[in-house]
Image: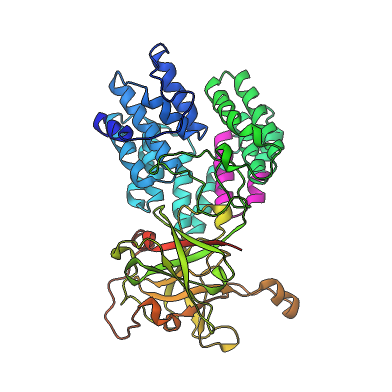
Amino acid sequence: MRARWLLFFCGWTLLSTAFAGEHIRDEDHATLLRQAAVFVEAERYKDAVAVLKNFEPRSPDDEVSVGILTGKIYLGINRPAKAVGYFEEAQSQAPERFEAALGAAQTHLQLGQFTQARHFVQMAQSLKPDSSEPDLVLATMALRTGNPSQASAQMLGLMKSRPESEGVVISYSRYLAITGDSAAAKRVLEGFAERHPDAAAVREQLGDWEIKSGKQAAGLQLKRMAATLYERQGDFFKRDVIQAWVEVHGQFASQAEPPEAKGVAQQSREDKSPVPVVADKDFAPPVKRFPFPSGVMITGGSGFIVDGGRKIVTNRHVVEGGKEFAVRTGLGEIITARLLFLSSTDDIAVLELAQPLPADRAIPAKAYVKPGVGRNVVVMGYPLWSVLGEGSPSLTNGIVSKRTGLQDDKGTFQLTAKVNKGNSGGPVFDLHGNVVGITVGKLDSKKFQDDEGFIPEDVNFAIHVDRIPPIANIQLLSDVPSPPELGAEELYQTMLGKVVMVATYK
């Protein structure tokens, strides 16, 4: 652990803070570690690192605590590949530490490594049976692999068993948010707060909801109320976390767009919660997702990597009219791109990455086939990314239901896998891992109801792979033996680094 801890701090260049440049010797040892933990929970990662730089572990327990905090920092800035080793090493040295097991489970979830995630979920559940956080990991895993009914059963069962548990209600609210039902997520919290006037954590969560909705003043009021309740209850750590957060972000309560010059990362209009900037190139800010000008409205869709890691295929309507372009991979990389091709006949565009990815991150050139009716398929992409977050893609399952699209359009086909805003441009896979189409949209249910008097279900469309232009350098194959079918989890893990979120602004 100590070797890993030393590597973590080696070669860092940090902006000056209240702690930087000072080697603190007189402060109480435990107080320093507590201060670092407060900063981590308050998402003040730069300040946490500055404290830890001056903290000298004096025991194996100290080293485990530093490892857990380091893992949380890397997970918080969406660097799960770096976080996982810290959590796992901490868990191996201190198997009784719940935070280490839970952190490892959450990190493997982000990496799409679901077998390992389940292993650490079981450890976490055995250490803290009353915690609902491991259940949320399992439900999120089910959602990402196209099993919403399983996820719903998991969380509804939890709610029915402990409806008055504050932790359970918060986890259920977060689950509803992940599914895209933000209104219900907020209602659940508000109902609990009405029944429990002393529910500090619920009020803190409601404060976060208000801030993310752009209601900074109301959100800060709720967070301060939560801090007062924590203090009355003797939970001074959580009180201090809120106060540490407010110290940095309270000044922006009356500002529509916090300026980057004061240390707040640029955000899309859908997500206005401020997040601290970290200077180190390997410690990029978690919410400065794309290198676009401050204050612009970011729009996005999905895409997939082709041509040996050099290009991205997506929909034309995702990028048309955009001023700048960037992609975010399922592994957390952010890469700028330029528009290379816009089809005049199909809803297809091709981007070229400024920095090519390794060739094995591209979908192989010979993994493209046209689907037959009845074939099982999977849609992979970033649906509702402004609500659900863009850290990881998700899957939905279905079948090819018709060889042609709307009004028998031969360039598209119909499928039953559910498609939402944000899925546009993502790949449609068969269960062998071949790309069979490009997600393009779904039937306008409201217009159909107005015209026909009823709402059709599961009518979604994708573009045939033979419409992908030659510039993408793919080969459409037929009558080629396919590899064995993959399970949803195996397919997800295989394609996690090959499916991207595409972003632009206009």
Is residue 172 visible from the viewing direction of this image? yes
Residue in the picture at 44% in, 44% down:
284
Q: Which quarter of the figure has residue 458? A: bottom right
Left or right for 260, reference 127: right
- Residue 462 image point, x, y percent: 50, 77
Check if residue 144 falls in the magenta segment: no
Name the chief secondary structure element in magenta: helix
Is residue 160 visible from the viewing direction of this image? no
Tell me how the rendering is colored. rainbow
The tally of labels here is: 0
- Residue 21 image point, x, y percent: 41, 23
Above/below status of 87 relative to 329: above
Please state, as top left, top right, bottom left or bottom right, where the N terminus lies in the image: top left
**Magenta stretch?**
165-187
Residue in the picture at 56% in, 64% down:
323
Residue in the picture at 62% in, 46% down:
272
- Residue 48 image point, x, y percent: 44, 29
- Residue 289 image point, x, y percent: 50, 51
Above/below status of 396 relative to 232: below
Q: Which quarter of the figure has residue 212? A: top right
Q: Please, which residue is most extreme toward the left here? A: 3
Check if residue 177 falls in the magenta segment: yes
